[in-house]
Image: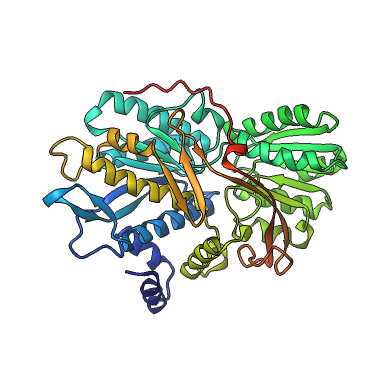
Amino acid sequence: MHPHTFLTTLRAWTVLTVCLLCAMAGAGAAPNAGVPIKVAMIEGLSGPFTNTGEAAYRNLAWAAQNINADGGVAWGGGRTAKQRPIEIVRFDSKSRPEEALSALRSAIDQGIRVVVQGNSSAVALALVDAINKHNARDPANRVVFLNYAAVEPSLTNEACSFWHFRFDAHANMRMAALIQSIESNTDLKRVYLIGQDYSFGQSVVKEARSQLQAKRPDVVIVGQELHPMARIKDFAPYAAKIMASGAQAVVTGNWGNDLTLLVKAAKDAGFDGTFYTFYGNALGAPAAIGQAGVDKVLAVAEWFPNLGGEASDAFYKRFKASFPTPEHDYLHMRMQGMMLALARGLSVSSQVGQVGQGDVVDAYQLALAMEKTDITVAGHRMQMRAADHQIDQPLVVSVMDKVGQPGVPFDAEGSGFGFKVLQRLTAQQAAMPTSCAMVRP
């Protein structure tokens, strides 16, 4: 089923979720396709970070739909060759590690051998540990974990795993990109650091302090704060501390409602400084900030809608056509690449796996194939490092501006504000060394 046919169906039903359900069911696969390859998405789909979980699901579902429309996964060879669709199976972790581990057990019991997750490094660390133990204990039913957003650096350093693959730049890589922008702002002298009080937020604040001291020793850190994750409803007291500190800028790795509420509170308090963020470009933040964010809110990512280029623009327009509701406008290019890499890896692994494996995913052969990932989506190239399973890809720093201004043809989530590219880092410039000592089966 081609995208235009899918949209016709969508309009006929007038319900956006039909898009997601069709992708889950393997929409677009040939009538004689083999049984679906199930992929378990373990994500916070209820609670304070529901919006981030649903955004991840939309990206995975759309990627699956595109893969299936193109024939799905070419499985096996010779007379047993078949085309198999990918099916995304949702598991709600409620953004809590213990719930995620329960979901993992359920997925394994259902015969699922590929797990994807990203929104919470605490959850990712728990999953890696559990998968390592499960795979050692039960090698006949091993699992591969693809990570699209958990950016705690240790996941591809001291806590690296043969079974885990990260498709996002880790926090230190993102921070280095932001610090380069701070280096060029010679008027900036006072910075406030704030983050969520868990592994990722702690690492962001620590790395911001370290890199500022190394690259801008003249900048004074006038405040440092860690707040409970997903529990703060009113950030006014934190905004008051920022104002009282005399900070000219805030550096934060906050995401989801913890970011949106923070920047809104700062705006309401009259803060006129700059926000250097990891995720200030979507999930309600641009609309919450509004005009006050123009030239004041920076974000870093592997891709932005206003990056430019024919392939990039066309890809983004296809996504917007599939998800016309403004609040659903959040395309993760890395997730599209991850799913395409998975489809190719599955195909390769099915041809070299154990004799008689039938429709069962051979996790070991899949991991070997994923190590060789070298894929380009809409002009965006991604290469997996076999040494630590960290993806190498370009990074981009952008600043908020009004749509229609030079370099801002697209806005974010119908807010009237988009992000203009300030700086591009090649994959080589964005890469960092690793301390991973990979243990291979």
Picture coordinates of residue 292 (x, y %)? 79, 58
- Left or right of 35 on screen, residue 295: right
| Vertical order, 115 against 210 (above or below) | below
Picture coordinates of residue 313 (x, y %)? 55, 64
| Vertical order, 11 against 74 (above or below) | below
Picture coordinates of residue 47 (x, y %)? 51, 49
Q: Quadrant of residue 231?
A: top right
Q: Quadrant of residue 7?
A: bottom left
Image quarter in which the C terminus is found: top left
Q: How was this image coloured?
A: rainbow
Picture coordinates of residue 68 (x, y %)? 31, 60
- Left or right of 239 on screen, residue 303: left
**Residue shown at 24%/28% (left/top)?**
139
**Residue shown at 52%/36% (left/top)?**
121
Image quarter in which the N terminus is found: bottom left
Q: How many marks?
A: 0
Quick one: 232 or 358, which is closer to the camera? 358
- Left or right of 412 on screen, residue 142: left
**Residue shown at 47%/36% (left/top)?**
123
Q: Is residue 60 in sight in this rendering?
A: yes
Quick one: 171 or 367, which is closer to the camera? 367
Quick one: 351 or 284, which is closer to the camera? 351
Q: Is residue 233 in sight in this rendering?
A: no
Quick one: 109 or 12, which is closer to the camera? 12
Q: Residue furthest bottom?
A: 12
